[in-house]
Image (tube, coloured by chain):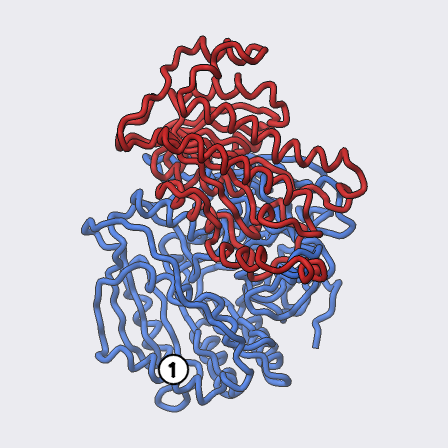
Chain colours: A red, B blue
Amino acid sequence: MARAAGAPRRVLALGATSAIAEATLRLMAEQGASFFLVARNAAKLEAVSADLLTRGAAQVSGEVADLDDTAGHPALLARAVAALGGIDVALIAHGVLGIQAEAERDYATAEAVLRTNFLSAVSLVTWLANYFEGEPRAWRGEVEGQGVDALTATNIPHPRKRRGERRGTIAVISSVAGDRGRKSNYVYGASKGGLNVFLDGVRNRIDRAGVQVLTIKPGFVATPMTAHLAKSALFASPAVVARHILNAIDRGKDIAYAPPFWGLIMLVVRSIPGRIFKRLNL
Amino acid sequence: MGSSATSTKQAPQFESWGRYPKMQADVVPLHWTTDFPLPQAPPTKVLPVGLGRSYGDVCLLDHGTLLETSGMDRLLHFDAATGVLRCETGVSLQQILDFAVPRGFFLPVTPGTKYVTVGGAIANDIHGKNHHVAGAFGRHVLRFELVRSDGSRFVCSPVENPEWFAATIGGMGLTGLMTWAEIRLRPIVSRKIQYRGEKFHGIEEFFGLSQVATSEYTVAWIDCVSTGRSFARGIFMQGDHAPEPAPLTKSKEPRLTFPIELPAIALNRWSMAAFNSLYFHKQVGKQKTASIDYEPFFYPLDAVLHWNRMYGRKGLLQFQNVIPFESGREGMIEILKAITKSGLASFLAVIKFFGEVPSVGMMSFPKPGVMLALDFPIRKDVSFDLVERLAKITLEHGGRMYSAKDARMTAEQFQAFYPQWQDFARYVDPGFDSAFWQRVTGRRPLDG
């Protein structure tokens, strides 16, 4: 069901215990949003839920799941839709940094990073794009497994677009690392770079249906994922990044560098000619 | 974005607010209450730390492992009827105010900065301008969870594990890691404080004003530089939460940061004397009343982040003590004389009466008497001698110094100030330690 104007947001957060996601969800909780949270760790999920409820969330539910399990995605999304009565914002925030040195030596390590950061996000966005667009073929038994039965069984009407209305938002936390392959982190970078191209395509497809597809590109952020890295002045806090994300969602943006100065940095990085780039220590 | 921006780390240096002494330690950030005990037991002892607003070495551990708690910053439950807030111990007082003020609640006790974690507030049993009415922070803590290095976790309150409750409040983080705590906030209807400032000359007049004051919040700024007629002049400040309802908005974030470290020469007795003169005469009349926002009343220095950089790379020393009322006058006069004689200037000197409300913690600092707190720049041959002299005067008059501010107490002085220290030591976790605790138990000598 589409959201009535002024009604609080219904937010699905995948990877809800990620630091950037948590900070973003807090801002939405202060606005009275409802949430369905998905993460791998039950204790952490409970802590985040308590925080959001205390700060003003209308309702918080969720489940423990490993998003690497792409076969389970349709059923998971159906349960989210049922719990919330519809989704206004789907925030995809799960991901791993991986260890570049290991991924170089061993393909299986690289594959794991690609599966978590790229494939599982592709799977989720595929189903979500179809849900928001209201495309019936996704629900009609064309994929095996209980997922589709679960979806059709919930009997939620497809969102119908009215003129000028935003039917929903798919917001995905990507990274500046996807803008250009660098020797220090290209496996992670590739997982995000591929994701960026995929999201561009989905955006081009469903924009006319009134669906926002937002590619969020944070730069360096001080989170548990980067705890092992020496901090420099370039590092932003999750709270700052969250404000930019919420801003970008509200403004209907396509791509958001967070903080925005990274847009300029990456413009420069992308422009460096290859023969010079190869000699840099990036 | 060179490789230095993404190199794996050398230990980032965690500094106390005084930036003296400086020590190297591994810093392990905790983000979840389940992050401790650490997956692999560290090779060194550990110490929980928050936002580093303590001075001295109570939040340092040389070549140890600091458990940095500000990532455990979740609110867990709030009861709007009773004002009881349960939150993780890395939540700062500023975050609590951002949450509570719009809902009509304030901190029951607040120190001079809001950039302090709940854990730090409990571990140092902090006090505020309302001590004579409300006691210290620990009095407003209902319960908390304590986690020990052997993995045991238990809830502490006045009825559950009460000895652990008393040992951990004011326990300087040595009894274990607090993961969450419940505190009772107090209701307010306005951001405004009804303020009154009154000039005074001399300790006698300060005592007189303190004895008749009726406000909830009182503190006096006192000039520790001037001699002669201006000796011990100051401004006695009183405040109460305004009773008339007014919009309860969130505070704006500070925009000013002290950008550089000043060279040591910048703060000297002449520049400080000039500042003191200006500050004293800023209030033109003898008495002044006003309705002011709570921010500048409670947190004047928070408006400039990193103001401690003003003291340069060497850092500063803080001296804070309390002397019982019986010897309060003579004790304070002797202390002020010693300070003016030393030529060392301090422009952040505050003096206040502590009240009779008993402290809950075994090792808590506040007790009934006169309290003095002031900063000095660190000058070779002068500063350490002065603090030594002030510690002696404090001891002679039956007073004690505050661990959270201290870098120079000797083991003998500490043990005389807090004779219950051996009782307390039984609650110290074998896996925890601090540079302060090493010093005051005679295991680490004073440097310099």
Which of B80/A237 is in front? A237
Residue at the image point whose x is 74% and y is 59% from the top: B63
Picture residue at 57% right of the left edge, 71% below the top = B395
- Relative to B155, residue B138 above or below: below
Task: Say which quadrant the N terminus of chain B sits in.
Answer: bottom right
Q: Nearer the viewer, residue B17 or B437?
A: B17
Residue placed furthest toward the left? B244
Residue B402 location in percent, x, y?
54, 64
Tag 1: Cα neighbours inside 10 Å, few (<14), some, or many (≥20)?
Answer: many
Q: Position of residue A200 (x, y in %)?
A: 49, 38
For this view, does B144 lie left or right of residue A162? right
Against A114, residue B371 (above or below) is below
**Depth order, front residue of B135/B112:** B112
Q: Residue at x 24, y 60 (%)?
A: B194
Vertical position of residue B126 compared to residue A238: above or below: below
Is residue B138 visible in the rendered image? The answer is no
Q: x%, y% of residue B182?
A: 47, 40
| Amino acid at the residue labelled 1 | Asn
Examine the image and state in which quarter residue B184 appears. top left
**Residue to which mark 1 is pinned:** B276
Q: Chain letter of disc 1?
A: B
Residue furthest right as drawn: A105
Residue B228, image x, y percentages: 39, 91
| SS assignment at label 1 | helix
